[in-house]
Image (cartoon, rainbow, N blue to C red):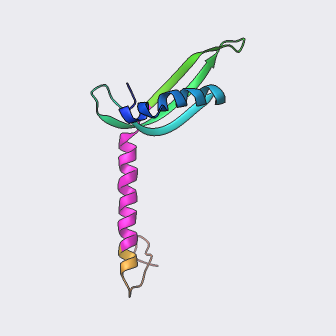
Amino acid sequence: MFYPREAIDRGLPREELERATALGRFGEEGWRLRMDGSTFWASVVITALHDPQGRFMGFAKVTRDLTERKRQVDTLRHSEEQFRLLIEAVKDYASFMLDLEGGG
């Protein structure tokens, strides 16, 4: 089961399949469950499959674990926020951009 209990209670699995059926494809990122019950950040793509005559046959679903990427993005976002708060807190300052040789 890929979905946390609260997502199942909200009808998320059914909603994703309905959207894939209506649009041909559904994609999103969000929290999912591993078999051991731990969570991971996932990229999910569900594609509605049809036979050559156009009759619906079922779905193909690809789920990729993007937990490490999300952690890196969140860490960078936090660092940028900390830097922004630092700059906003300083009242008297000057900013300089230097190249690798120390020149401007």
Magenta stretch, overall SS: helix
The boundaries of the magenta stretch are 64-85
**In front: 38, or 12?**
12
Q: Is residue 61 visible?
A: yes
Residue at 48% over, 32% down: 12
Q: x, y (%) of residue 80?
A: 40, 64
Q: x, y (%) of residue 24?
A: 64, 27
Q: x, y (%) of residue 64?
A: 43, 32
Residue at 65% over, 28% down: 22
Residue at 48% over, 31% down: 11
**In front: 14, or 104?**
14
Query: Where 70 sits versus 102, above or below?
Result: above
Q: x, y (%) of residue 82?
A: 35, 67
The answer to which quarter of the image holds residue 103 is: bottom left
Q: Quadrant of the N terminus?
A: top left
Residue 71 inside the magenta-drawn segment: yes
Q: Name the residue furthest left.
A: 36
**In front: 85, or 4?**
4
Q: Name the residue furthest front.
A: 9
Numbered-mark total? 0
The reply, left or right, for residue 60 in relation to residue 3 is: right
The reply, left or right, for residue 8 in relation to residue 48 is: left
